[in-house]
Amino acid sequence: MNEVLRALYETCPKLTTAYIKDVLGLHDDRAIRVAEITGGISRDEADMLSDVVREVKPIHSLEVGLGYGFSAIAICDAAYQDAPGRRHIVIDPHQTEFAKLFRDLRRDA
């Protein structure tokens, strides 16, 4: 696993069970399972994504939804190790803070 991704899994705060129950309205086993997730995908899922990218060797890939970006890091790292120059495109309409940041950067440039 990529060292940056490993560090993120070790340091990124996890969703608390209380938050999941109160805000997301999930209870019982579902709340516990969600509480164990960091970054939307598990470490095993990130490893699987890396393996798939290395095996399929896509020239271009598209990801819908960014979350913490753990899957994007896994995909990009695997693609770059195999063949630099590949493209991974991520779209997420809920990432409005990044859009604001880029608009501000362009305006200030």
Image (cartoon, grey):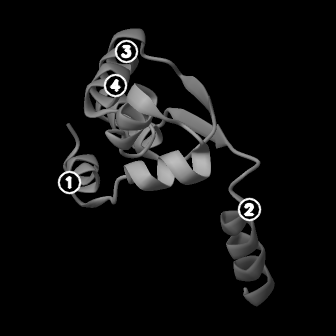
**Looking at the rendering, which quadrant does residue 96 occupy?**
bottom right
Q: Quadrant of the N terminus?
A: top left
From the top left corner, tell me how far across and down residue 97 is, in percent. 68, 68
| Among numbered discs 2 and 1, the one appearing first in the sequence | 1
**Residue 52 tag number:** 3
The residue positioned 27% from the left and 26% from the top of the image is 47
Task: Tell which circle, 2 or 4, labels the residue nearer the N-terminal end.
Answer: 4
Compared with 107, 40 (above or below) is above
Amino acid type of disc 3?
Val
Q: Earlier in the sequence, mark 3 or mark 4?
A: 4
Q: Earlier in the sequence, mark 1 or mark 3?
A: 1
Q: Amino acid at mark 4?
A: Glu
- Picture disc at residue 10: 1
Residue at point 59%, 45% (across, down): 24
Seen from this angle, which residue lies furthest front?
A: 28
Q: Distance from label 3 to label 4 (Cα)?
A: 10 Å
How far apart marks 2 and 1 lie (CA) works out to: 26 Å
Name the amino acid type tagged 1.
Answer: Glu
For discs 3 and 4, the disc positioned in front in the rendered view: 4
